[in-house]
Amino acid sequence: MKNELILVIDFYSQFNQLIARRVRECGVYSEIVPHDTPIDVIKAKNPKGIIFTGGPANVYKEDSPKCAKEIFDLGIPILGICYGMQLTSQLLGGKVESAGEEEYGVFSAKLNTNSKLFNGFEQQNDFLMSHFDKVTKIPEGFEINASTDTTPISGIQNEEKKIYGVQFHPEVELSKNGVQLFKNFLFDICGCNADWKISSFVENKIEEIRNKVGDGKALCALSGGVDSSVAAELMSRAIGKNLTCIFVDHGLLRKNEAEEVVKVFANREDLNFVKIDASRRFLEKLKDVTDPEMKRKIIGEEFIRVFEDEAKKIGKVDYLVQGTIYPDVIESGVESRATIKSHHNVGGLPKYVDFKEIIEPLRELFKDEVRKVGTELDLPDYLVYRQPFPGPGLAIRIIGNINEDKLNILKNADYIFRDEITKAKLDRKINQYFAVLTNTRSVGVMGDERTYDYTIALRAVETNDFMTAEWSKIPYDILEKISSRIVNEVKYVNRVVYDITGKPPATIEWE
């Protein structure tokens, strides 16, 4: 069964993933596509509704991102958010001008509660504003449905054509009742039925894999992390013994990681499991490499080459399976065209891959949805809620060049950090936490002697979807203990700092 679809058309918004998440939280499947997606492609996807994201550009400038004007003639309901509202106005004959200065913060908006978009709202509601420009003239056939003291035209609508726009950001938590606005758009305006359920996803995906692979063989890149483990389980349910799971120890794993992965997967009778020690091979390829994008691409290609070598030993293998998830795709610029960082299994893949096809069964899911799939498949909690770990491993947690000495420093510091978080029973509250070996060395003093050693940075975040995150407020006494243990137990480290940056503007990983 094909799910109903809401298309999120992206104009380089920092909140594009968050909009897609809000739609899915309402039980409706959503996809993010770039603003220049051809109109024929949009029509072929047959969406129930379209949402334009915000964006940093000025719509009245020649080089600003735009979509095809014909999109408004498709008869598909449209909701424009911030830049999306300004673009709607500009393309349909309205006027957009500079607001004179940026308006950022929570503003109280007066709403027309007779509008379907604001059904169930009180007449005043607080929303987050973040814009430099504003609509000063609405298109013909539209009316104003929201206003603030500083932005008289904060919302517009043409209810006959089901085209709406809001200057504020309902997708962020700072906006009161933002989810209700999305529900009104999805159900009252688009007529969606909320048919996006994890149970139906699992059932449909297993059937889809069976139909695709048939009697063919597949090789799964199994790292032991949440994503690859869930992908392996889905594939195993679909094709059984025709699946071989390859665990590659690339020498960039956390302390004791390889042993833990082998313990979980090696003794399963229903799973062909092979462990490959390729640590020397990867470290030689990474020698003297400092650029993070280059690290990811080298690791991505070398993974593929290892899998190709192993596939030849197994016999003819048509399919390579990866635990790619939707944030990997978005951040690698595959869907949004704006690359944040190339994930080793997406933007880091080489041009030539000696497999008939790559299967990515979790490609359309966010991290929390992957965990729900894992639970639906009856995977144990300790596996489903395991700390996320990037495929490139510690290579992107070491700033600068990589060598065995640096790897040992980071492995030991990271182990202490994770150990103390677990002892403090914060391991389920904090969604991701790890240490970073910076390329900064500084003066210190130990045993009455001068030192000139490395700085370790600690990173811990709390998040639901891993697309936005807040830094975790770890109690000072725990941070103090972690810092003390690291500088006393790990050689060549004399300073520990704590990263208190959210996402955005930062990413969760440092590289």
Image (cartoon, rainbow, N blue to C red):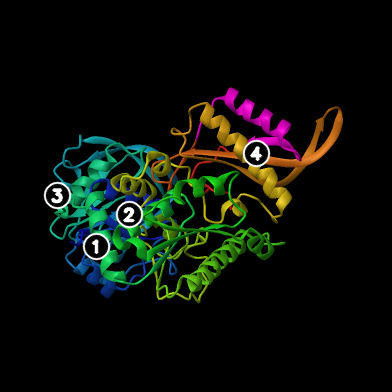
Residue at x 82%, y 31% (from the top left corner): 445
Q: Which is nearer the N-term, disc 2 or disc 1?
A: 2
Q: Amino acid at mark 1?
A: Glu
Q: Which residues are magenta?
A: 472-497
**Few, some or many residues within 10 Å of mark 3 (<14, 14–19, 20+):** few
User: Could you say where residue 491 lies in the image, as x and y percent from the top left?
Assistant: 75, 38
Q: Is residue 34 visible?
A: no
Distance CA(mark 1)–CA(mark 4): 44 Å
Q: Is residue 68 above or below residue 503?
A: below
- Per the image, is 435 magenta? no
Q: Is residue 371 left or right of residue 92?
A: right
Question: For mark 4, what is the residue?
Answer: 413
User: Could you say where residue 449 lies in the image, as x and y percent from the top left?
Assistant: 87, 31
User: Could you say where residue 347 lies in the image, as x and y percent from the top left?
Assistant: 49, 65
Distance CA(mark 2)–CA(mark 4): 53 Å
Local secondary structure at mark 1: helix
Question: For mark 2, what is the residue?
Answer: 135
Given this view, does label 1 or label 4 mark the residue nearer the observer?
1
Given this view, does label 3 or label 4 mark the residue nearer the observer?
4
**Few, some or many residues within 10 Å of mark 4 (<14, 14–19, 20+):** many
Q: Which is nearer the N-term, disc 2 or disc 4?
A: 2
Local secondary structure at mark 2: strand
